[in-house]
Image: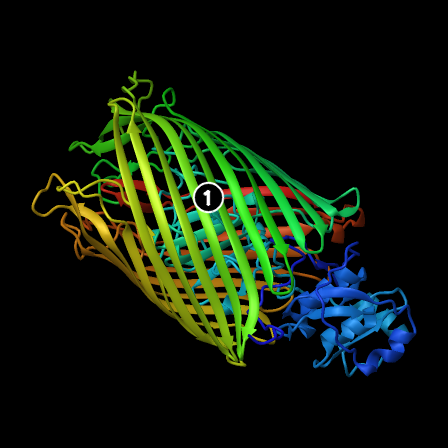
Amino acid sequence: MSARRPRRAIQSVARPAARQRFPLFATRSAAVALALRAIPASLALGGLCAAPAALAAQAAAQPAASQSYNVPAGPLGTALSDFAVQAGVTVQLDARLVDGLASPGLHGSYSVADGFGKLLAGTKLEIAQSSTGVWLVRARAATADTAAAAAADATLPTVKVAAQNDSPYGPTEGVVAKWSSTATKTGTPIVEAQQSISVVTRDQMNQQNAQTLNAAVRYEAGVSTETRGAVATRYDMLNIRGFSADTYWNGLKQIGSGMYTTPQVDPYLMDRIEVLRGPVSVLYGQASAGGLINQESKLPTVQPYHEVGIEFGNDRHQQATMDFSGPIAGDQHYLYRFTAIGRQEDGQVESTRNERVAVAPSFTWRPDDKTTLTLYALYQRDPASTSYGSVPAVGTVLYDPLGTIGRGFYDGEASFERFSRTQEAVGYQFEHAFNNTWKVRSNARYYHISQDYASVYGSNLEDDYRTLDRATAVSYEQLNSFAVDNQVEGNFSTGPVDHTVLAGFDYQHMGTDYATGFGSAPSIDVFNPVYGAAVDYPALTRTRASSNQYGIYAQDQLRYKKVLMTVGVRQDWANTVTNDLTDNTRQWQNDHAMTWRGGISYLFDSGIVPYFSYSESFTPQSGTDINGKAFDPERGRQYELGVKYQPKHYNALFTAAIFDLTRKNLLTTDANNPNYQSQAGEARSRGVELEAKVSLTRSLDVSASYTYLNTIYTKDNSGLQDKHLAAIPSNQASLWAYYTIHGGPLAGLSFGGGGRYTGATYSTDNSFQVRSFFLVDAALRYDLGYAIPRLKGAEVYVNAQNLLNKTYVASCYIGNYCAYGYGRQVFAGMNYRW
């Protein structure tokens, strides 16, 4: 094994410790300030390098005390910021100077000037120190003396630093994220990940005022959101590439089971949301074939941050938020964050209500330069959450001679309706670096959900076109889950090949106890509903179930010159025990599966990266066939061919992919014994995805996407073969643009708008189609500090979603059950940050 060479972009991005969300850059009104204060502990992992002679004179003119530094390889802007943090100095630059430039890192003892010089060696940039002590990065052609540098300190232009203030974890300035942790678990540039991935940044969520996970990802390629329309705010019901998607939080699966218990965390508590498309079992175990959505929490920051907000809107919407973070008592070994939100509003469906309060504290301890431990917790209480009902297809999508059912129609009974959910979670993230080659990580979380649910819902519209039959569902549930993921990562070289090796063991446990019942309820007139009918509670049956999954996995990211390869393999064991406490029966299910993936890509100097990959997934299934044989897990496999492009001269990321994704071993009616099921089913999704995230100038952000999907059942015994999957559009497109004015009489004003097109979708049996629809969103924001300096940090805003108030049916998802989409939502509020 050869000595380890400086790694290029495949190296994990620089970060002080495991999964830290430490903002390394702060944008000022007059300058992009990489305002980085001293961290008491230096980071020393060895290696000595000589400084360029060009800085010798300058270094001699100031204190030349040396100290040890450890600046990992990565984007040059990130390397400069890491060095400044460790040196305890402030550095300023026009971020456009370093956009697209990489650094091999810095390890060893240097003076401040020598360290900056080493990082800038081989570039056309140089360093100078102003009279105020600020270090200025500028083009080498500039020969201004120290006095001129001081003047530059006051006139440096304000630009976005999205490309630099970016890491695999935590916040990203602007809408263009260039690093991700979800695809590889190691921290990899998105252009080098050989699978399609999108990142929704905190800035994008703020621009669009996304208040649900569905709203946060509705502009991303390949994602079908709000398939249950405006009624399902209590669940994150999403599809990726035509198939259901799993949700993760801080890299661990949000485990749900029982009858209706599903975790859901408010997106205000998140710094970023990553969408990984296609099978992911090689790293995450049992998972849906469509992919996953990983939500990354707001966690402690080195720089103090304080924000409070208040918001109002139509349907009696009221919301209050707070977000505080920074060192405890000024000691950067101890960091905290406290984020909270409270919201209440009327639901779109009559007689329904949304209510929520969520609190998310976290604490980070950094005892030394190699170790970080972050503890986090969640308390979220949802006393009410609209309705979980529907509207019939006749009278909404299909013609009803008596008229059209209103989108506010309520198919339930307010005196019976109930949804109350409490979620509590505690978790930790730990990382320790043994040396410059090996590090370990551990990530774990305990989650508890208590839920009380009762509903009257519509089931069938009678032949008179107005009488809706109804039924009831009741469920009392308790769910406890635990997940842990332990990893070891190595970065080394064997001859001319660089490696990032990952090996891990993870474990998931779920235990649930629920009592459920289903019954009938009096019918109702959809055009003249009369509520208040007596509804009987159904008899309940009680069930207790538990499941476990154990997995071991290994992955190697190899680099030979400009060729990148990724190979991963995993073995899983899963078991489930279900006890019917009413009938005193028990069922066991034991499964195991091996999955793997591989990918290859090539990095052209132009920033274009073509790639090809293959990946697999598995999902356990309960039940047995006619012979009593337990069903095998569902299997998914995907072939993907794509290209990514990261320009060197402006801040953007373009991606395109074509794919062939197949789910096998699906349950369907046994062709010879209709009272049983067999695993003869199969579904396929083929498609094209195009996506662009661009900051065209320092003022304009643009996000655009287009998706084409062809999703069909290729094998089925129940009449679905060769039919399209329900509620999945063949075509989707979106465009969002956001512009900020920095100068002139309108300085401080931001405005944006977007359009979302969703093509026609099919009903379950393909007997009819749901019409396509196009929705318009808009945003307006103003920084009050430009008009009244005393109000610096305060801003007011207005957001409108479905601005034109279009009435549309989002989908008909099962049989003739359909759902109206959101009507116009208008939010106006004020934030104050200091």
Residue 688: image quadrant is bottom left
Q: Quadrant of residue 379?
A: top right
Instruction: Out of 823 and 442, give the one closest to the viewer.
Output: 442
Q: Is residue 34 something one can see in this rendering?
A: no
Of 287 and 693, the residue lying toward us? 287
Residue at the far left: name it.
672
- The answer to whether residue 700 of the structure is visible from this angle is yes
The image quarter containing residue 73 is: bottom right
- Left or right: where does residue 343 sit relative to residue 785? left
Q: Which residue is drawn at 39% across and 61% down?
A: 569
Q: In x, y percent, where is residue 328?
A: 75, 42
Q: Name the residue under label 1.
A: 824
Nearer-the-camera pick, 334 or 48: 48
Say how the picture is coloured. rainbow
Query: Would you place residue 386 above or below residue 786 in this image?
Result: above
Q: Is 829 drawn above or below residue 45 in the view shown?
A: above
Left or right of residue 820: residue 91 = right
Picture coordinates of residue 161, whole percent (x, y)? 66, 64
What SS does tag 1 mark? loop
Label 1 neighbour load within 10 Å: few <14, some 14-19, many 20+: some
